[in-house]
Amino acid sequence: MKYEAEFSSYKNWLDGQEKSKHTKEKNMRDVEKFRKFCKKNLETVTKQDVQSYKEYLIVNKYKPSSINSYIISLNNFLKFMNKDSVRVKTLKIQGRASLNNVLTEQEYAALLTTAKNRKNKRLYYLIRTITSSGIRIGELQYITSDMLENGKAFVHIKGKMREIIISRQLCQELLEYCEEQGISGVIFHGKKNNTLIDKAYIWREMKTLAKEAGVPEEKVHAHNFRHFFAKQFMAEYHDIVDLADILGHTSIETTRIYTRTSRQEKQERINALNL
């Protein structure tokens, strides 16, 4: 019962931190994962317990990024429990100089053509919207029929306010799409007009689209379209400060990740030097 009370208090504390629903749910799952591993009252957890958990994740070949994610969630909970002394450090991961699975312009064009040729054009416009604005998939809920009149919407997430801007051309196309489909409110809605379409459904549809278009499935996911936007923006304007504002990044260092090229692109540039 004590654990249940602690867990409930932690959930309430997370609510007060203005975390997204997804982040809160993940934090709770990650703490529960540790509890099952530890098999003891969390009040009596020692640093050795936490270190053993970290070693367990390493030995069982979890991805370094996943290990760090679990550790961050657990450290967050331990901080809430006033047990800072038992927290452990995350793994040091060397930054990659290149990115894998970056969409090429040809692959993006193939995906758009295939999506546009479908009877239902929703996925086509969904991909266009992400790629034309650089928004996160969860921010699609702010793309409504009302905001198309001026092409702007304000997003309030994690205590931060930022502006989303949609191009005039896309706004016009989306207005026509909404009129054809009788859509009002959230354009990419689920069963209810005011709720966003299920993310798992979007993921499945993108994988199916990838097969149809002959594009590697691992390249076709919502975040990769955001990355594609960032690459195109930088290639055209070379303004990382403006890009950071558009993507909603607090730190430009985060934005730099989106500007890295793939290994193939680096190879082609080196070949082109002809030295």
Image (cartoon, grey):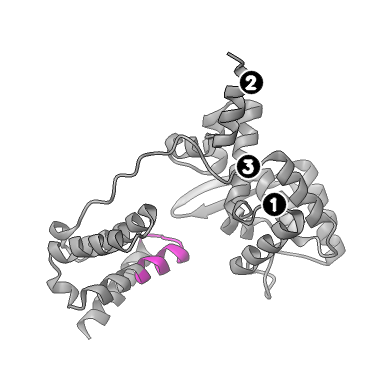
Measured as percent of width and height from the top left, residue 130 is found at 66, 50
Q: Is residue 167 left or right of residue 259?
A: right
Residue denoted by label 3: 228
Q: Nearer the viewer, mark 3 or mark 1?
A: 1
Q: Quadrant of residue 210?
A: bottom right
For the stretch drawn in magenta, what is the main secondary structure?
helix
Q: Earlier in the sequence, mark 3 or mark 1?
A: 1
Helix, strand or loop at label 2? It is helix
Residue at screen point 66% across, 61% down: 207
State the CA–CA distance, disc 3 to disc 1: 15 Å
Quadrant into which the N terminus falls: bottom left
Q: Nearer the viewer, residue 115 or 138?
A: 115
What amino acid is labelled 3 in the image? Phe
Q: Quadrant of residue 206?
A: bottom right
Q: How many marks?
A: 3
Measured as percent of width and height from the top left, residue 268 is found at 62, 28
Residue denoted by label 2: 272
Q: Is residue 38 left or right of residue 219?
A: left
Residue 198 against residue 92 in the figure, above or below: below
Q: Are marks 3 and 1 in contact (CB under 8 Å)?
A: no
As drawn, which residue projects farthest toward the top? 275
Measured as percent of width and height from the top left, residue 17 is found at 36, 60
Range drawn in magenta = 17-29
Q: Are marks 3 and 2 in contact (CB under 8 Å)?
A: no
Residue at screen point 57% across, 59% down: 138
Badge 3: residue crowd in 10 Å (few <14, some 14–19, many ≥20): many
Residue at screen point 16% across, 58% down: 84
Q: Is residue 230 left or right of residue 64?
A: right
Badge 1: residue crowd in 10 Å (few <14, some 14–19, many ≥20): some
